[in-house]
Amino acid sequence: MKKVKEKLEKIGEKAIETSFAREAIKKIKRNRLFKIVYQEVEKFIAKKMVEEVKKGKLPRHIAIIMDGNRRYALKEGMPPHKGHEAGKDKLEEVVEWCHEVGVRVLTVFAFSTDNFKRPKHEIEHLMKLFEEDLRKLANDERIHKNRVRIKVIGQIDLLPENVKKAAEEVMEKTKDYDRYYFNIAIGYGGREEIVDAIRRIVNDVKNKKIEPQDINDETISSYLYTSHLPFPDPDLVLRTSGEERISNFLLWQLAYSELYFTDVYWPALKKTDFLKAIQSYQRRQRRYGK
């Protein structure tokens, strides 16, 4: 009986490989009734997963490399900028998921210093989205109700003036909040962050504010962009789109972070995918070299 079952499974796998089967599956997925049923099932599963996740030890700080916007757009037959817009909407959902399960700190990699090499029209569209989103966050009732402190981290002076002003506005309006923390890395590079910290430390040594022999791990951490956080180092790092690298993101802070990679493109990330990452974290034993 076992052999018969295995044979049937192999036949099924082979059938899915055919173009006919793939097209049939696509048509089923496009069906409105299928979508409604699928969404309801997803909601039910996610609800149960949230209940289970809350019983375990939660990561206090999650960092996310939001990758795959352009590839998602290509897959869906849309222009690249539509992928970035879908990615922006997904981020709103993820912020809510974090609050729901009790993750206090979320740091997302939105735009690296290397991304300035992209085509001019794409950068301009992204900057427009950043400005819109930051201004929206500054006036979002949920942000103020949940007392979320928002900080834009990176080389802010490299950003267009309108984006810079929007960043300053949302940071000023939320600077006194301390229930949740939401960091958005724009114009950010991990090596650049460390270089910037070293320069400021050297300057303070020259000005006799600190002594060279007193410099340690904690000193360096206090000069980084994440120094304002109650938990500066992420417990869990999630990267979407199937790439398995950290791409110059929070190099100092990730020394002991747990890494989780998923093949799902960022705009397509489901709540269940997000919760699976947390479940994976909860199954791991963190030893910190001990």
Image: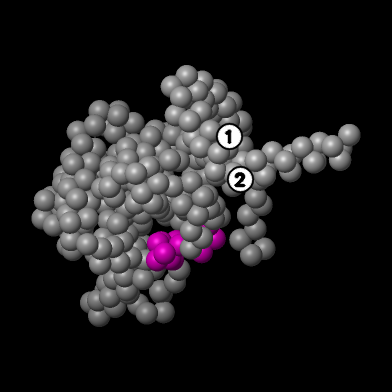
Query: Depth-wise, is mark 1 or mark 2 nearer the camera?
Result: 2
Q: Gap in Å between the C-alphas at discs 1 and 2? A: 35 Å
Q: Residue at x 43, y 22 (%)?
A: 32
* Secondary element type, mark 1: helix
Is tag 1's residue or tag 2's residue first in the polypeptide sequence?
2
Residue 86 versus residue 194 in the image, above or below: above
Does 157 sit left or right of 8 as displayed? left
Q: x, y percentage for residue 153? A: 29, 56
- Position of the N terminus, as image quadrant, is top right
Q: Amino acid at mark 1?
A: Val
**Please, which residue is most extreme toward the left here?**
161
Q: x, y percentage for residue 188? A: 30, 61
Does 11 sit left or right of 161 as displayed? right
Residue 163 versus residue 102 in the image, above or below: below
* Secondary element type, mark 2: helix
Q: 10 Å neighbourhood of mark 2: few (<14), some, or many (≥20)?
A: few
Q: Amino acid at mark 2?
A: Glu
Q: Residue at x 56, y 55 (%)?
A: 258
Give the magenta range.
246-257
Q: Residue at x 22, y 55 (%)?
A: 122
Q: Main secondary structure of the magenta part?
A: loop
Name the disc covering residue 53, or none. 1
Q: Residue at x 69, y 38 (%)?
A: 12
Q: 10 Å neighbourhood of mark 1: few (<14), some, or many (≥20)?
A: some
- Can you identify the residue that label 2 sits on? 17
Query: Between 106 and 159, which is closer to the camera in this rendering?
Result: 159
- Position of the C terminus, as image quadrant, is bottom right
